[in-house]
């Protein structure tokens, strides 16, 4: 039996100054799946993720999250998403606890459950000792963790992470990957990344974007079949570039 | 939800050192004006007392001070409102609100009420200073209350105006300057209007404040303030909704 669909997007298009940044992308995500989004710089990865989370309206196309249409029922749909953008949306003058509580309230967690949600999110992201610290005074790696904690505090069905391990040290990268794998058990995760070994170790499925178009979609096992991930990625993107 | 956003906004306004500095400078200037007016009044008091209907301390000291405060608020409020939306856009924290299950109405009202709470504190601080008049004389409580009501309504309209420009812009400074420019222009319209009934005067918030400043609580003025505040908030909500739904 296949797991239920948590996110589906059809024919997403986005123009920027008359240039197509994202051109007719469709994708589907099921519960318990980790999807990797690959592509060169400027391929449209971040734009796609922003559209999927409602941060940016598409020029055309439809997005459904947990059976709610993102355009028609934005409140219901957005309650099912957690998003870590490229630049974590952190208020530098707030304390970690205060900020996460605010994020929890914004995502409609009832007051009685906020303390539990806060403790759980902090524990999952390794922030137990930082509760009283000002976000602005944290290192880049810890800020990234607060960004992730903000995205998962309400236990969303879909977690969207835009380059989650950028700027982290190796130990932190390992922790975050463990966390993403945990998340992959109970909800769906989409992550964009440039690190191919990250895709190899985390993702069930991979899609590759090039110049705003979806040029490859398949399981990560299929990609690994031709040898290593890096070769497979370069082969796919170069073939595509040559054929156009 | 509105309360959550308002509380957060109020707190982060208070967490910023700039807010405290603005408040301190403002209180200082206000106190300076207060003593100045007081000094002037005491010098002419003996002559005033010989008139049949001599003006009291409230109308000679408190009312002019309130119009000074009205001017100060006009200049100050854009500095606060530019943070509300434009700065969030620049700092890329706006995304948090965009992707959270909150409507534009909740965001706008939350931010407006959060700022309003701070403005109430500012007006209350100055009202407390004026209340010291009660220690030395029988002040006209009615006139003072009308002034305070007027200041609050005026502050709320400037806040709504600033919030609208904050929503239109990505650059906080441009948002602040636009709001300041427009409210300054409206103030000049009021000053420059040749007669009291001219149309130009009718659209200026400071003209409507003047009635309250002289102690005249007129329903037309109150309706004007309510209308301008709701219209500007509505425009802000409309703009944000449009931005969220339509790809530019």
Image (cartoon, coloured by chain):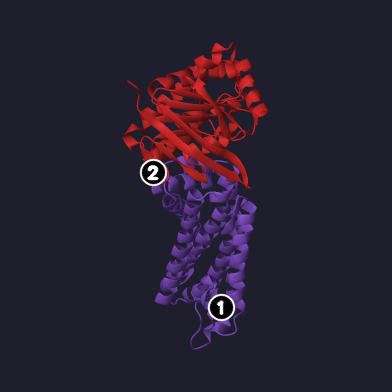
Chain colours: A red, B purple
Which residue is at the front of the view, A88 or B125?
A: A88
Q: How many marks?
A: 2
The x, y position of residue B177, in whole percent, is: 64, 59
* Left or right of residue B134, residue A164 in this image: right
Task: Tell me how far mark 2 sits from mark 1, CA to CA.
Answer: 42 Å
Name the outermost residue toward the bottom.
B52
Q: Residue at x 36, y 28 (%)?
A: A116
Q: Secondary structure at mark 2?
A: helix
Quarter residue A234 falls in? top right
Chain of the residue that carries numbered disc 2 in the rendered image: A
Does label 1 lie on the same chain as label 2? no
Which residue is at the front of the view, A80 or B57?
A: A80
* Left or right of residue A144, residue A80 in this image: left
Residue B123 - label: none
Which residue bears the numbered disc 1? B200
Please identify, in this view, whether the residue under mark 2 or under mark 1 is nearer the observer.
2
Name the outermost residue toward the right.
A242
Q: Secondary structure at mark 1?
A: helix
Chain of the residue that carries numbered disc 1 in the rendered image: B
The x, y position of residue A218, in whole percent, is: 50, 22
Q: Is residue B132 visible?
A: no
The x, y position of residue A233, in whole percent, is: 61, 20
Which residue is at the front of the view, A216 or A230?
A: A216
Q: Is residue B232 visible?
A: yes
Quarter residue A111 falls in? top left
Image position of A6 with respect to B57: above or below: above
Q: Residue at x 54, y 33 (%)?
A: A134
Which residue bears the numbered disc 2? A75
Image position of A244 with respect to B240: above or below: above
Q: Residues within 10 Å of mark 2 (few under 14, many from 20)?
A: some
């Amino acid at each position: 039996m296949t797991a239920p669909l948590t996110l589906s997007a059809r024919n997403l298009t986005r123009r920027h100054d008359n240039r197509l940044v994202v051109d007719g992308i469709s994708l589907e995500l099921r519960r318990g799946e980790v999807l990797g989004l690959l592509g060169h710089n400027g391929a449209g990865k971040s734009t796609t993720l922003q559209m999927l989370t409602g941060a940016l309206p598409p020029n055309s196309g439809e997005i459904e999250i947990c059976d709610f249409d993102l355009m028609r029922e934005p409140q219901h749909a957005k309650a099912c998403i957690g998003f870590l953008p490229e630049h974590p949306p952190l208020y530098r003058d707030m304390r970690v606890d205060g900020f996460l509580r605010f994020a929890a309230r914004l995502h409609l967690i009832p007051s009685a459950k906020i303390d539990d949600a806060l403790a759980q999110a902090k524990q999952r992201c390794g922030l137990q000792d930082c509760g009283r610290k000002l976000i602005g005074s944290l290192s880049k790696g810890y800020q990234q963790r607060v960004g992730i904690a903000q995205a998962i505090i309400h236990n969303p069905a879909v977690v969207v992470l835009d380059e989650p391990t950028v700027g982290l040290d190796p130990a932190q990268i390992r922790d975050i990957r463990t966390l993403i794998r945990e998340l992959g058990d109970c909800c769906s995760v989409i992550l964009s990344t440039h690190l191919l070994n990250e895709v190899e170790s985390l993702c069930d499925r991979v899609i590759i974007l090039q110049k705003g178009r979806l040029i490859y979609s398949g399981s990560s096992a299929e990609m690994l079949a031709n040898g290593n991930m890096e070769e497979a990625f370069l082969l796919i993107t170069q073939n595509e570039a040559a054929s156009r | 939800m509105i309360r959550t956003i308002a509380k957060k906004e109020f707190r982060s306004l208070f967490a910023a050192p700039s807010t405290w500095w603005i408040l301190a400078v403002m209180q200082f200037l206000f106190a300076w004006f207060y003593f100045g007016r007081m000094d002037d009044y005491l010098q002419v008091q003996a002559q005033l007392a010989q008139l049949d209907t001599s003006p009291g301390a409230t109308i000679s000291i408190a009312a002019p001070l309130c119009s000074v405060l009205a001017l100060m608020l006009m200049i100050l409020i854009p500095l606060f409102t530019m943070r509300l939306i434009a700065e969030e856009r620049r700092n890329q924290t706006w995304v948090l609100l965009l992707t959270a299950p909150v409507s534009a109405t909740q965001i706008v009202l939350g931010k407006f009420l959060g700022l309003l709470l701070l403005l109430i504190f500012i007006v209350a601080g100055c009202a407390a200073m004026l209340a010291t008049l009660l220690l030395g004389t029988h002040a006209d409580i009615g006139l003072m209350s009308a002034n305070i009501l007027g200041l609050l309504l005026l502050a709320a309209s400037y806040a709504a105006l600033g919030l609208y420009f904050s929503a239109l812009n990505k650059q906080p400074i441009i948002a602040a300057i636009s709001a300041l420019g427009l409210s300054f222009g409206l103030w000049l319209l009021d000053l420059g209007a040749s007669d009291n009934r001219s149309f130009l005067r009718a659209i200026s918030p400071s003209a409507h404040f003047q009635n309250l400043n002289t102690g005249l609580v007129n329903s037309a003025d109150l309706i004007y303030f309510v209308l301008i505040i709701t219209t500007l908030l509505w425009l802000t909500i409309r703009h944000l909704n449009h931005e969220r739904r339509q790809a530019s």
